[in-house]
Amino acid sequence: MKKNRYIFLFIIVALFTLFNSIISFKSFADDIQNNILTLERAQSEAILNSNILKEDNRSLDALHDERSKTIRQEKQAKNRKSNSEWDATLEDYKYESGDKSKEVDMKIESNEIKLKEDEKQIKRKVLHLFQDILIKQKELEVAKINIEYEYKQLKISELKNNLGKISDIDLKNSKNKYDEMVTLSATKRIELDNLYNTLNQSIGHEINKRYVVVLDDIDENFSIESIKKPENIIDMVLKNRYDYVNLKNSYEIQNLNLNNIKIKYTPNTYIYQEEERTLNNYKELYQEKEISIKNELENEYSQLILCKEKLNSNEQILKNSKTIFQNKYNFFKCGRLSKMDIENARIDMINKELDYMINKFEFQRNLDKYISNYDYTK
């Protein structure tokens, strides 16, 4: 009986311990998970926190209110028209013809496009911050390895100086190199903190909060041939570019104004000719913008091709560097190379990794920017 009671107590204690272990593990897992910041989450929070987007939405709300008011005024203008004593102004004609609501509709259209563009710009800013943080972390890794290397070199120089094999000037140069690496590392740390601070401000978090930022790598099956060429997307781009649509709508609105002016003023009057000049100016502006956007797309596409070629080259350079390091390491294991030779090869390989990362992110930025011209989820 007594033995059974001890067994029962042992089982209870064991279950309690297991339960606490599970709770502790879950808490630890949650802490790890909560410290991870994905790009998608950061972009979503930046959009919610953006004052620019809040202002865009307020402007759209005001325009929708203006449209409702305009519809009512257009009905009133049509009712007044039936009155033979009605002395209509040019503004009255715009309401009576329905041109005023067309004008407001065009403003709503351009502001909706601006809202989408501002959202894309915010997402792009967060992407760049993620990439810059990862690059800066890699630079710190390189700086740390360089500090360790220069410290070893300094100790060797001190020993040689004590033995009279190198001068005090050579020793001072070795000390300066070490100090430069320490200063560089401290600078990189400050730069990394500034990047995190900017990210936290963008997403509305405490400024001192730090995360493990996560960024998806390039799809291995990605092919540059899958990207649409400028001539195949230009119509879609023009339709969805705020700068172009805004200028074109200004032209259309001015054209409506000129049609109303014709009611009271003939083409030989100063007022008519002044409004006609304004119309022609708007036309020139949006046509020039169309040419500018076409050139911009061509340049973006060319830059994307060049960037991909550069990335392919850097990838091969990195592979060669890793092969060289592995070969030297094998020689080192056989006693045919010194530890400093291995350190040099390792530093070279890590620098090549940094170069590859920088070029990979440059390609991703160019790719994201170009694709966002026609893929509006980007």
Image (cartoon, helix red, strand yellow):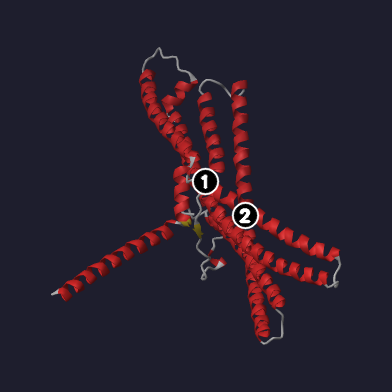
Residue identified by numbered label 2: 189
The answer to whether residue 208 of the structure is visible from this angle is: yes
Q: Is residue 145 left or right of residue 224?
A: right
Residue type indicated by callout 2: Arg
- Dot 2 falls on a residue whose secondary structure is helix
Residue 116 seen in this snapshot: no
The amino acid type of the residue labelled 1 equals Ile
Label 2: few (<14), some (14–19) or many (≥20) C-alpha neighbours in 10 Å: some
Q: Residue at image x 56%, y 42%?
A: 243
Please tell me the numbered disc located at residue 359. none
Q: Residues within 10 Å of mark 1 (few under 14, many from 20)?
A: some
Camera-nearest residue between 110 and 119:
119
N-terminal of the pair, mark 2 or mark 1, is 2
x, y percent for residue 290: 60, 46
In-image side of 90 versus 311 (left or right): left
Residue 279 in the image, given as x and y percentages of width and height: 59, 32
Q: Are marks 2 and 1 in contact (CB under 8 Å)?
A: no
